[in-house]
Structure formats: C-alpha cells, structure tokens
Image (cartoon, rainbow, N blue to C red):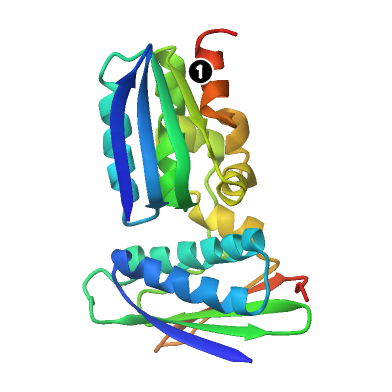
C-alpha cells in the first residue's frame, strides 16, 4: 500500500511518498516520478518522511532515474528517510549515487545553492 | 521455538508475510533495524518466487518457517514452483543496471548482503531456501 502525491511548491516539484514501496506497489511510485521527470521541473524533491518500508522494487525505481537526472541536469533530492529505510539505501551504496538529505530545509538549501 | 506461515502466491499478499515476520521477531526482542533487514531479505525471496516461479498457479502457497537458535534465526522458505537457485545466480553489476535504466535486479544482491548463510535445495516436489542471520537478542 502506497500513496504518492505531487505538488508544486516555490521553485520545485514535491513528491510525497507514504506507506510501503514493495514488489506490488512500487509501480505507482514509478508512475509519479516519470510524470515529474516529464514535467520540465528543474528540481524535484521526494519527501519520504512517511515511507515505512522499501524493497528492491522501490530502490529499483530510484535507481532507474539516476542516469536521466544526470543527463538532464535535474536536481533530484530525497529527504526524510527513517533510519531503517536509510539503511536499505546504504546496503548497496545507493546513498552515494542519489542525493539524500535529512530534512526538507536541507533539501531546499541544496536547490537554492546555500 | 518454531513459527510457520503460508503466503498465497500474489504480490499484494507480501504485506501479510512482512507483518507476520515482523511480529515474530519483535516478540523475540530483535531490534527494529535488524528486523527490517531480515523482513526485507525474506520479502525479496518471496517476491521472486511469486513473480518468477508461479506464473499460472495463483492458488499455490509459499511456506515460511522461522526457527530461533541461541545466536541467530533460521528462515526456511518452501515453494513448489520453478526452482531458482540463488546460490548459482550470477549477480548483475550495479553500474550496468543503472546505465541500462533497469528497475529491477538488486533483490538477490540485498539477500546476500543481509544474510550470513544461504542454502538451497530442490527435489521434484519442492524447493527449499534456508537463510540464517546471526542476531544479538536484546534482553
């Protein structure tokens, strides 16, 4: 069970992910990120504060956009990971390949070049 | 002490399995972080079996047994679908998956990183995957 929503805030697009990103639900996460990538937004923030679980299917969604984010020079930042979800990102070193910040304020500061 | 659970072969039933494993491990005072890691490993194995091993037989079950030892936990996952030996599976390279924009392929890598022992056996009737994780039980 997952709920993914998009809103435009200030100078970025915000994607909010709630629930569990597993083999059954990650397709919804993929759909929303695809939409955001196609929207011409130069900055995309992903709020994972209420993401309680992620499996390889969810990691795979984030992984699959690493190349496109670099090619299009999009600022793509994930923030608000709980300790247990953050650990899953770090098992394979994906925390080094994606931009992950602790809080929304940290993510905003990154976009604004502070 | 042993615990057992049957999961119907459907991806949207994986949540039930995760809740079962989480509850059992919490009952034995395993920390949240370690519990999540083991739940993830079992989830990856079950998702693989459901997606790749049982293409047509929706009525089948995957059976999970959990047994505690003094210094760790054994998970036994039994199914009757097409055998998939994760021990002889050639893992993809992460950089290649990223370059090719793959959305899958890292599940088995996670299982191998998380678990301390992995054993696979298969007969004409069923496949059994055993996963062991060393655990320091909180008292």
* Residue for point 52% across, 46% down: B92
Left or right: where does residue A71 sit relative to residue B76?
left
Q: Position of residue A99 (x, y in %)?
A: 55, 26
In the foreground, B130 or B25: B25
Q: On the rendered structure, is A57 left or right of B114?
A: left
Q: Position of residue B75 (x, y in %)?
A: 58, 78
Q: Nearer the viewer, residue B22 or A50?
A: A50
- Camera-nearest residue between B8 and A14: A14
Q: Residue at the top extreme?
A: A113
Provide the chain ID for the residue under circle 1.
A
- Using the image, determine if residue A48 lies above or below residue B31: above
Is residue A50 visible in the rendered image? The answer is yes
Is residue A105 shown left or right of residue B17? right
Give percent across and percent down for residue B113: 65, 56
The picture quadrant where one finds residue B132 is bottom right
Image: A26 above or below B138: above
Residue picked out by circle 1: A108
At a point 78% along the width and 71% down the height, the residue shown is: B136
Q: Is residue A107 above or below residue B8?
A: above
Q: Position of residue B70 (x, y in %)?
A: 78, 83
On-image quarter of the C terminus of chain B? bottom right
Question: Quick one: which residue is furthest to the bottom in this view?
Answer: B1
């Amino acid at each position: 069970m997952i709920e993914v929503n998009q809103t435009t805030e200030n100078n970025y697009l915000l994607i909010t992910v709630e629930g569990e990103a597993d083999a059954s639900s990650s397709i919804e996460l993929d759909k929303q990120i695809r939409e955001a990538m196609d929207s011409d937004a130069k900055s995309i923030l992903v709020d994972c504060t209420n993401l309680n679980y992620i499996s390889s299917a969810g990691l795979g969604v984030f992984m699959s956009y690493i190349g496109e984010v670099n090619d299009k020079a999009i600022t793509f930042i994930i923030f608000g990971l709980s300790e247990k979800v953050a650990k899953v990102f770090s098992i394979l070193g994906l925390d080094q390949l994606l931009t992950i910040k602790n809080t929304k304020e940290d993510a905003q500061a990154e976009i604004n070049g502070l | 002490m042993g615990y057992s659970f049957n999961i119907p072969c459907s991806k949207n039933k994986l949540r039930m399995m995760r809740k079962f494993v989480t509850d059992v491990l919490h009952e034995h005072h395993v920390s949240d972080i370690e519990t999540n890691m083991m739940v993830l490993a079992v989830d990856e194995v079950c998702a693989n079996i459901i997606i790749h091993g049982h293409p047509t037989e929706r009525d089948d079950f995957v059976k999970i047994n959990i047994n505690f030892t003094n210094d760790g936990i054994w998970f036994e996952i039994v199914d009757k679908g097409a055998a998939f030996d994760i021990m002889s599976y050639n893992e993809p390279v992460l950089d290649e998956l990223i370059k090719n924009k793959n959305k899958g392929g890292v599940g088995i890598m996670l299982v191998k990183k998380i678990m301390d022992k992995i054993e696979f056996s298969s007969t004409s009737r069923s496949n059994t995957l055993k996963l062991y994780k060393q655990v320091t039980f909180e008292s």
